[in-house]
Each structure stands twice: as structure tokens, then as C-alpha cells.
Amino acid sequence: MAAVRDAIILAGGRGTRMLPASLYMPKETMPLVDTPVINHLISEAAKSGVERVHLVLSERKMGILEEFIENDKVFEDDVRKELPRDSLRLRSEGISLIPHIQYNPGGVADAISVAIENIDGPFLVLLGDMVVLDTHCSPDDYALDNASNASMELVKMYEKWGLPCVGVCTVEESEISKYGVVNLSDDMVIGLVEKPSVDEAPSNFVLCGRYLFPEHTSEILQKFPVSEFGEMQSIFLLNHLIQNDGLRAVNLDQMEIYDSGDPLSWLQSQVDHALRRDDLSDQMKEWIIERIGE
């Protein structure tokens, strides 16, 4: 039996930074060139070895995605025959896809609480607007082996040490105030500060949207009710783990971190991903050189 059997993808946010686009298309369905964010996330979770992927969605997003969640065969088989059929589906083979509705967005920990009663054991959490990639493939090359290894790295760390863990990466000083910043001793997290100034930041290592929480997370959340702690609930949860269970950091600096919740970051992500794809890189480089030269 897998050590970690469940993953939660948090996709209940309103995407206000991406308005007006997010009025018509949830940020989790926005394409990274030609593959939606949510497809990347589900494939990453499936590759880590989980059996169930829980999607925490707003009521509106549930209405948009319901057909794709419930129907494995949205397109007829004669459409784009050269594409692997799995690239046209949300569900990966052998994975149960379970939707949950978060009626009022209340932060990361509140979203976790929507699905946690259906989870037994430790579980992964993937933020729905953060794509973490170490492979850059076209849909033509779709296969689970080509999915991101980010969540798998967290599972490996958990299997080795039996402790909850978080994915971290380094950012430039100008970006520090946008993130939760961790203080590290080797690969142990010994402190966490939410969106500090540069002077207050204990390091330039930040949380990057990947977590592995322990089986007793539900009990910890009861100590920090969202009615009292609001969106800071997740920070109190992580600090509780640091002070009691122990929390390990998995350095994901070798991977590319793409944020679909911010217009400039997402535009840069499109270009970066295209430049790393074998099928697009040469043409993109030629176009960029030509465009800059104008």
C-alpha cells in the first residue's frame, strides 16, 4: 500500500489578480501553452503514487468542470487522432477524482478542511495556481512518466523520515514579500514568516505550493478555527508542525515554478515553457530575436 494515498488540489479561489480573464476561465484551467494547469497538477499527483485526487472547487468552478470530472470521454475518438487520448482527459488511469465544493473561500487550511473528512492517512496538497515542472513536453508526448516529479519528491522525503514536509524554492529579494518565507537548518524548517519585508525575512527560501501533511491534521486545525484565524490558519498549522512534529523542506529549485494567478508571471511562464519544449523552442527563439530587433 502506498504511504500517501490522497492528494488535494486547491482550486476554490476567485482568481481576482487574473480578472477579467478569470471571469470566463478559472485560472486552474488556463493553458500553459496548450495544456491546462489542472491537467499538469492531476498528472503530478498521480505520478507520486496516490490513489485519490480531491479537487476543492468553488460552486462556480464545479459547474464549469463537472462534465470533465464525470466524463472520461469528452471528445470523440476521431478528434486529433495523433494526440494520446489521456492528454484529453482530467482523470489519470487508476486514479479516483473526487470533487468537493468550498462555498466561501477562506484560505489554504480552510480549503483542506472541506476534503479532509474523506481522507485517511497523510496527504499531499497542491495549490491550484502553481505549476512545478522538471519536464517540458507537448501533448503529443503525454505520458505519466513525463509528469512533474515535485509531489513525488515530497512523498520520498516522507517515506524516509516519516515527517510532514513542504516544497521550497529560492526567489529574488524583490519577490520575498509575496510569499511565506522559511528559516532552515539543513532540511528542517525551524521558522516561518508570512510575507515579510526583505529585512525581516530569515532567508530567500519560500513556500512554493506543495505540502505533505500528517494524518492528524484535522485535529490540529481544530486548534486554529478559521472563524478566529482567517486565512492565517494555514500559517498557524505549519508553525504548529514546526514546533511539535517537525517539518522538513524539499528543495525544488531544480524545477521551474509557474504561477497562473498573476498576469506577468503567467506570461513569462508561457515563454519559458515554450523555450524549453523541443517542438517549440527553435521557432520561439527565432521569433523573440526578430521581435527584439525591431
Image (tube, helix red, strand yellow):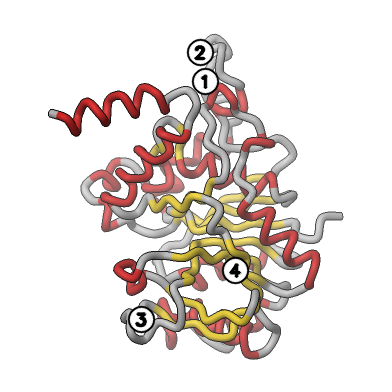
Image coordinates of residue 244 in percent, x first then y, are 67, 89
Residue denoted by label 3:
196
Question: Could you tell me the amino acid type at mark 2?
Answer: Val
Q: CA distance from mark 1 to mark 2?
A: 7 Å
Query: Residue at left 41%, top 65%?
Result: 171
Work out whether residue 100 can be spotted.
Answer: no
Q: Nearer the viewer, mark 2 or mark 3?
A: 3
Write down the residue under mark 2. 79
Going from N to C along the chain, the mark reached first, 2 or 3, is 2
Please provide percent x and percent y for residue 117.
Answer: 66, 67
Which residue is denoted by mark 1 in the rendering? 75
Closest to the camera, between mark 1 and mark 4, is 4
Which image quadrant: the C terminus? top left
Amino acid type for the residue under numbered disc 1: Phe
Label 1 Cα crowd, 10 Å radius (few <14 / some 14-19 / many 20+): few
Q: Position of residue 118 (x, y in %)?
A: 68, 62
Residue 31: in sight, yes or no?
yes
Residue at the image position 36 percent from the left and 77 percent from the top: 195
Q: Are marks 3 and 4 in contact (CB under 8 Å)?
A: no
Q: Is residue 55 depicted above or below 177 in this figure?
A: above
Mark nearer the viewer, 4 or 2: 4
Mark pair 4, 2: CA separation: 40 Å
Gap between marks 1 and 3 measured at Cα: 47 Å
Name the mark on residue 166. Answer: 4
